[in-house]
Amino acid sequence: MKEYKIKMMDHAPMCPKCWSRIEKTMIDECVWMDDYKPVCYAQVCYVKGDGFYARLTCEETNPKAVHEGFFSDVYKDSCLEMFAKWDDASDKYINIEMNSKGASLIALGADRHERTRIDQLCGHPFEVKAEVKENEWNVTVHVTEEDLCKIYGMSADKFVPGYVIMGNFYKCGDETDVEHYVMWNPVGTENPDYHRPEFFGRMVIEA
């Protein structure tokens, strides 16, 4: 099982210099097929009283991005994803799936079948920002303490150094030129299935 250290910061990472200080973890495991595996990585930080910022980056030219808006089928596009179980007392995790237009699909549940749209739980989608450059693209999602407390019925007092969030990072493209599935922590199933929390890795808040 892989482990990633979530950096604690005293302010939101709003510039490239800030993100350069946050550890990268590679999304580079192929379990089901390996015909296409672009360079991808994830970065996560935590700002006390504010929440979590996660940036996922893919070195890819002209990423497919057909779907727009919230709760669209972005996994059919070139897609970067973060799944996380933010409350260690719950069996429910949040899937955050994003394309290079900033369109997203975000929901809560214990498996792939029984899921609830995140805007029905906290009143709005999470804030997602996308950036497309010549040879790479990235998406940044802001997951606030306020929203997590509302969604899980938890207290943000849990988020202290050493707290463990179970989760995974993914890159996929169900309907791209080359169908592909790449992940951070390997998923041990015969067929592609990202909704398998038993294969999540550890994301630990560091001091």
Image (tube, rainbow, N blue to C red):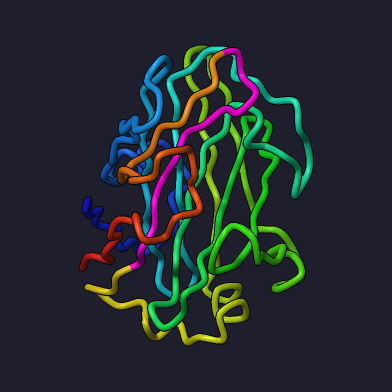
Q: Hey, which quadrant is residue 150 in on the image? A: bottom right
Going 44% across and 67% down the picture, which residue do you hit?
85
- Number of numbered labels in the structure image: 0
Q: Is residue 167 visible?
A: yes
In front: 63, or 200?
200
Going 28% across and 66% down the picture, which residue do you hit?
205
Magenta highlight: main SS: strand
Residue 177 left/right relative to 13: right
Which residues, given as a range, are shown in magenta? 165-177
Going 67% across and 49% down the picture, which residue do you hit?
105
Residue 132 left/right relative to 16: right
Question: Is residue 168 inside the magenta stretch?
Answer: yes
Residue 163 picture location, percent across and down? 28, 74
In front: 110, or 96?
110
Residue 186 picture location, percent across and down? 31, 43
Q: Is residue 7 visible?
A: no
Residue 146 picture location, percent across and down? 58, 76
Residue 56 left/right relative to 3: right
Question: Is residue 173 inside the magenta stretch?
Answer: yes
